[in-house]
Amino acid sequence: MKTDNRRETYNYHNHLNVIEMESLPGRTIKQVGDALEKIAGGGYGFCSECHITIQPDPLRTMPFATLCRDCQDYLDGKGREKYRL
């Protein structure tokens, strides 16, 4: 019985990964389009959360980045301890 549950869980998570990978190209195209709109509007390169300038390295790696490193770390849970009151 435990093996069946593990197999079902594995299949479920594997299915979710496949769906996520299938949607990746469309999501990336939208992100690039959003970045082009920001370039046209003068808002490119600024964090959408804290509004400071995003450093060049993340933008070179991912030109459609919308968050600075601190805000991205916080979102990912890496910076929550740093910001805890």
Image: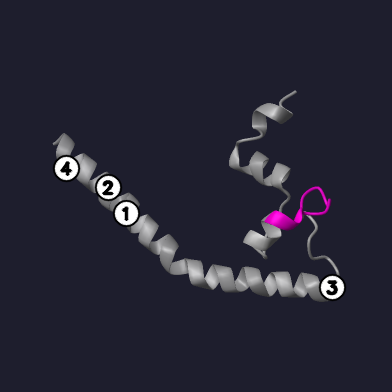
Q: Residue at x 23, y 41 (%)?
A: 6
Residues 63 and 36: in front is 63
Residues 53 and 2: in front is 53
Q: Residue at x 71, y 69 (%)?
A: 35
Q: Report, in whole angstroms, how far the alpha carbon at label 1 lies from the one at label 2.
A: 6 Å
Within-10-Å neighbours for mark 3: few <14, some 14–19, many 20+: few
What label sits on residue 14 in the rendered view? 1
What label sits on residue 41 in the rendered view? 3
Within-10-Å neighbours for mark 4: few <14, some 14–19, many 20+: few
Q: Position of residue 4 (x, y in %)?
A: 16, 42
Q: Amino acid at mark 4?
A: Asp
Q: Amino acid at mark 3?
A: Gly
Residue 50 lies within the magenta run: yes
Image quadrant containing the N terminus: top left
* N-term mark: 4 or 3: 4
Q: Which residues are magenta?
A: 49-57
Q: Report, in whole angstroms, how far the alpha carbon at label 2 lies from the one at label 3.
A: 45 Å
* N-term mark: 2 or 3: 2
Q: Report, in whole angstroms, how far the alpha carbon at label 4 lies from the one at label 3.
A: 54 Å
Q: Report, in whole angstroms, how far the alpha carbon at label 3 lies from the one at label 1.
A: 40 Å
Q: Position of residue 65 (x, y in %)?
A: 68, 59
Q: Which residue is mark 4?
A: 4
Q: Is residue 64 above or below residue 49?
A: below
* CB-based contact (under 8 Å), mark 1 and mark 2: yes
Looking at the image, is mark 4 or mark 3 nearer the viewer? 3
Q: Is residue 7 left or right of residue 53?
A: left
Q: Residue at x 70, y 55 (%)?
A: 57
Q: Residue at x 78, y 70 (%)?
A: 38
Q: Amino acid at mark 2?
A: Tyr
